[in-house]
Amino acid sequence: MIRLLAADAVAYGDGGGKAITFPSPVFGRERVAQLFVELSRLGLELKLRVRPTQVNGQPGALFTDPEGRLITVVSLDIADDQVQAIRSVSNPEKLRHLGPLADTSGLLREPGGPSIPDLT
C-alpha cells in the first residue's frame, strides 16, 4: 500500500464535531499508511463493510456497520498514479442524503472497546 501513496500524502477526516474521526490531518506517506493500517484493524474488529464507489468523480468507498448503516465515505485524490489525499467524511449532516446512518459513538462506547487511532 505504501507505494501507492505520494511522499507528501495527506489524510483528512471530517466529522463536523458530530461524528468520530481522526482529529486533525495526517501528513506523510508513512504516517498515512500507519493510520490506515490501524483503521483497517478497527474496521475488522467492528465488522464494517466496505463498498467501492465513485465519490465526486474520484475512486472511493462507503463504509457501513454490519446492519448496512453508513459510517463514513472515503474518497481518494489521485495524480501521477499515486494517492495524494484521502478524504473521510463522517459528518452526519453531509451524509444524511445517502441513507440510514450508524451511531458511530455507540460503536466505540463499549468499555475496553476499540478506539480511533491518534497519529497527530
Image: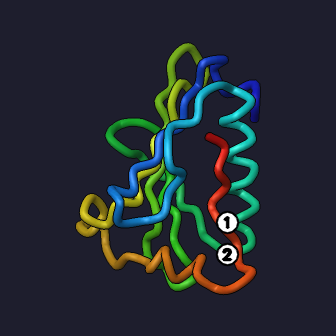
Residue ID at (74%, 41%): 34
**C-beta proximity under 8 Å, tags 2 and 1:** yes
Q: Nearer the viewer, residue 95 or 107?
A: 107
- Quarter where residue 30 is shown: top right
- Quarter where residue 7 is shown: top right
Q: Nearer the viewer, residue 114 or 6?
A: 114
Query: Which residue is labeled 1 in the image?
Result: 43
Residue ID at (70%, 72%): 114
Image position of 47 with respect to 4: above or below: below
Residue 60 shows in the view: no
Label 2: state its secondary structure.
Answer: loop
Q: Using a 10 Å C-alpha cutoff, classify the residue at mark 1 as few (fewer than 14 neighbours), some (14 to 19) or many (20 or more).
A: some
Q: Nearer the viewer, residue 91 or 4?
A: 91
Residue 49 shows in the view: yes
Any mark on residue 82, and which?
Answer: none
Residue lying farthest top? Answer: 80
Image position of 78 with respect to 93: above or below: above
Q: Using a 10 Å C-alpha cutoff, classify the residue at mark 2 as few (fewer than 14 neighbours), some (14 to 19) or many (20 or more).
A: some
The spot of residue 82 in percent (x, y) is 61, 22
Query: Which residue is labeled 2 in the image?
Result: 46
- Which quarter shows the N terminus? top right
Residue ID at (69%, 26%): 29
Query: Could you tell whether 83 is left or right of 55 in the image?
Result: right
Image position of 113 with respect to 77: above or below: below
The spot of residue 55 in percent (x, y) is 38, 45
